[in-house]
Image (cartoon, grey):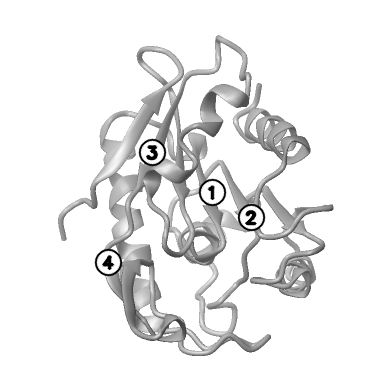
Amino acid sequence: MSLLPAIELETRSAPDAAVIWLHGLGADGSDFAPIVPELHLPPDLGIRFIFPHAPAMPVTVNGGYVMPAWFDILEMAIDRKVDSAQLLVSAARINRFVDRELDRGIDSRRIVLAGFSQGGAVAYQVGLSHSRPLGGLLAMSTYFATSDSIALSEANFDLPIEIHHGIHDPVVPQALGIRAAEFLRDRGYSVAFRSYPMDHSVCPQQIAHIADALQRFLGN
């Protein structure tokens, strides 16, 4: 399985940390790349930001229209039905990016997974099932689509997790973000949940919290 195309941005030369950031349905890796300079991270924090592009596929809830997607969404009810097999294929593709960062000399504990909406569902699967201890998980405006089937990895029971959600989100209701946080807390994970007066988007206050989370995850 070859690596998906991706945008890479480095905050300085020879970074010693990586953030793999997954976009939402219908977008691509360029969706979140402009946020990097807005994070105003300390100059001594060397991060390689990786923004993969999801493959194009038909999406059932959008009338079968072909668009960038990590997996098909079959129903948009509160307990949304998704193509779990496709989600697992996307998770395997993102694991290839994790492996490449390990090959580049990045310690697994300095690899962070971040995802928005559909991308967050994949990030949950990758981060919580990975066999190596990772640095953190940032789940934004998303849902834990594989909570009923995931094999939780002992290596990441201490994974710090931050969940962000808009209280006015009409696409992924905040209830799904809360449900994911409760699921994880019930199993002993450390979860910070933040809500914002926004819809299915990202706001300036949240960008500041993302910067704080990355510095906390990466020990700076």
Instruction: Tell me: residue 85, above or below residue 132.
Output: below
Decide: marks 1, 2 in contact (CB < 8 A)? yes
Residue type, numbered disc 1: Ala
Identify the mark at residue 50; answer none if there is no mark: 3
| Sequence-first tag of 2 and 3 | 3
Residue type, numbered disc 2: Met
Which residue is disc 2 drawn over? 140
Q: Quadrant of residue 214?
A: top right
Which residue is disc 4 drawn over? 56
Residue type, numbered disc 3: Ile
Front label number (2 vs 4)? 4
Decide: marks 2, 3 in contact (CB < 8 A)? no
Q: Is residue 191 left or right of residue 105?
A: right
C-alpha distance separating marks 3 and 4: 19 Å
Dot 3 falls on a residue whose secondary structure is: strand
Which residue is disc 1 drawn over? 114
How packed mark 4 is, by other alpha carbons closer than 10 Å (few <14, some 14-19, many 20 or more), is: some
Decide: marks 1, 4 in contact (CB < 8 A)? no
- Residue 180: image location, x then y, percent: 70, 70
Residue type, numbered disc 4: Ala
Identify the mark at residue 172; answer none if there is no mark: none
